[in-house]
Image: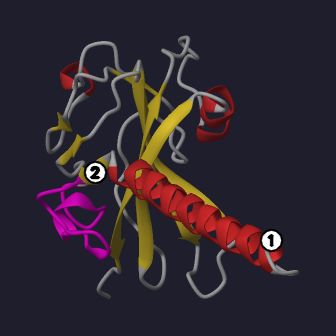
Amino acid sequence: MMKPGTVKRVVAIAAGAWLAAGATFLACESEVYSMSLTLTSSAFRHNGDIPRHYTCDGDDSSPPLSWNGVPAGAKSLVLIVDDPDAPDPKAPKMTWVHWVLYNIPPTATALAEAVATKNLPQGTLEGINDWKHAGYGGPCPPVGRHRYFHKLYALDTVLPDMHQPGKAKLENAMRGHILVQTELVGTYQRSR
C-alpha cells in the first residue's frame, strides 16, 4: 500500500516526463520544419551586403539564387523579394516589392544571375513589383541601409494564372497552401 501523497508524486513525475518528451518532440519537429528548405546566393551571405552589381547603382540584375530541401509534397514554389524598410529604415512606412515569381516547378533548384523571363524554369509565372512591371527590380534605397528579404515558399498546389498579380493577391492565393518557407536576407545602402 502507498503512503498518502505518493500517487500525487508519481502522477507529477509522469506528467513532467511527458511534458519534457513533448517539448523535445516539438523542438525537434520545429527544427526539422525550419531546416527543411534553405535558400542561398553565391553573391551574398545571409544578412550580408548585396553587391552593387545587383542594384540600381549597378546592372540592376537579379542575383543568383539556389535552394534545396523542397518537401516531397510540394507542387510549386513562390519567390517574393521585398524591402520592409521603405522609404527610411528609421521610419518605415511600407514594404516595397522587388520581385514576384510563382508556379516555379518544385524540381527547379536555382535561378541564374540576371535571369530573363524567357529563361525562367518552365511554367514559372511572374507577378508585378512596386515599379508596376514584371521582373526583378534591384535595391535602390533613397536613404539608409535597407534589408531585402528573399522569401521562398513551397506550396501544396499549382496556382492558377493570375495574370501578373501583385504581392498581396499572390499571398492571398497562397493562404492555406504553404508547406514550408525560408528566407535569405541581404542589405544595401547607396554610397552618396
Q: Residue at x 22, y 55 (%)?
A: 40
**Residue designated by label 2:** 39
In the rendered image, residue 169, in percent from the top left (x then y), is placed at: 67, 32
Disc 1 to disc 2, C-alpha distance: 52 Å
Mark 2 belongs to which amino acid? Answer: Leu
Q: Is residue 8 left or right of residue 107?
A: right
Quadrant in the picture for residue 183? bottom left
> Label 1 neighbourhood size at 10 Å, few (<14), some (14-19), many (20+)?
few
Mark 1 belongs to which amino acid? Answer: Val
In the rendered image, residue 15, in percent from the top left (x then y), is placed at: 70, 66
In depth, the one of 141 and 33 nearer the eye is 33
Could you tell me which secondary element the residue under label 1 belongs to? Answer: helix
- Which span is picked out in magenta? 40-59
Q: Which residue lies most toward the right here? A: 4
Q: Residue at x 49, y 63 (%)?
A: 24
In depth, the one of 54 and 37 nearer the eye is 37
- Say which mark, if any, is on residue 7: 1
